[in-house]
Image (cartoon, helix red, strand yellow):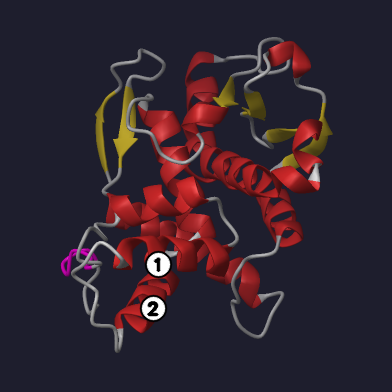
Amino acid sequence: MRWIADNTGRLARRPYYEDREMDLECEVVLREFMAGRRSEVGFPIETDDLTILIEQYADLDSMADLSHEGLDVEGVTIFGHRPLVRISERLWDPRRENRLRTTLTHELGHVVFHNALWVERRNQMQFDFAVSPLESQCHRESMVGSRSVDWMEWQAGYACGAFLMPYSALHELVSSLRRGRSDVISSTFVPALVEATRERFRVSEEAAQVRLAILGYGVEGQANPDFFPGT
């Protein structure tokens, strides 16, 4: 990680992470948490485990009425010494479980990667969070990693994919799927890879596609060999 100027004006400087650095950090957070709950990390990560993981870092209002924030706002993180994560009550419909899981992990990304920045800003500026809290409102289209959004939403979106589909587990899945197949360089492999990822990690097709594309699993189903040493 290195520090660069924040062109949004929210902070004097902001952290710049290589994708690989974010993947490593998310895996550490996830595996340390799961080590205290299971003998091994299994996938998919259960939704209940995701809520408990958030509660390790923040207060969680999992059934929040966010209707006044706008119809497309499904999660809000209010930064502070003990941040507050609010998740729209609308997402607890079983038909929206994938969206719920991406929202939970997106907000977790804000807490893990961004909360300390706002606490530092408060300490420097004597900012009163109780009077005017600093928060991140997360809209549906920014959940899984669109590069068209600003740096905070991009990082939280990347963390969303990294928490739900950790690199090492995804790399293992791709390797096992490629093994013994003769169509890994054909167009039939990519749909099979997306479907296997969706089922293995209990995510939407869109989230699986975005995560695989970001990690470089393209037409040939082959990731960048330099992305992680030793893989």
Rendered-image quadrant of the C terminus:
bottom left
| Label 1 vs label 2, nearer the camera | 1
The residue beneath circle 2 is 172
Residue drawn at x 21%, y 59% is: 219
* Three-letter code for the amino acid on which mark 2 is drawn: Glu
User: What residue sits right under mark 1 in the picture?
Assistant: 192
Kindly indicate the quadrant of the structure image that contains residue 40: bottom right
Quick check: 141 above or below 166?
above
Please identify the dominant SS of the magenta region: loop
Q: How many marks?
A: 2
Kindly identify the residue that appears in the image at 23 percent across and 58 percent down: 218
Q: Magenta stretch: residue 223 in it?
A: yes
Give the answer, above or below, for where 90 lies relative to 68. below
Q: Amino acid at mark 1?
A: Ala
- The magenta span reads 222-227
Say if residue 143 shows up in the picture: yes
Q: Nearer the viewer, residue 88 or 59?
A: 88
Place of residue 194 in the rendered image (x, y in percent of width and height, measured from the top left): 42, 60
Q: Are marks 1 and 2 in contact (CB under 8 Å)?
A: no
Rendered location of residue 145, percent (x, y): 41, 39
Give the spatial CA distance, label 1 vs label 2: 15 Å
N-terminal of the pair, mark 1 or mark 2, is 2
In the picture as drawn, the residue positioned furthest to the bottom comes out as 180
Q: Residue at x 72, y 75 (%)?
A: 37
Q: Secondary structure at mark 1?
A: helix
Q: Does residue 101 appear to the left or right of 28 in the view shown?
A: right
> Do we see residue 30 in this rendering?
no
Position of 184 relative to 108 (above/below): below
Is 104 magenta? The answer is no
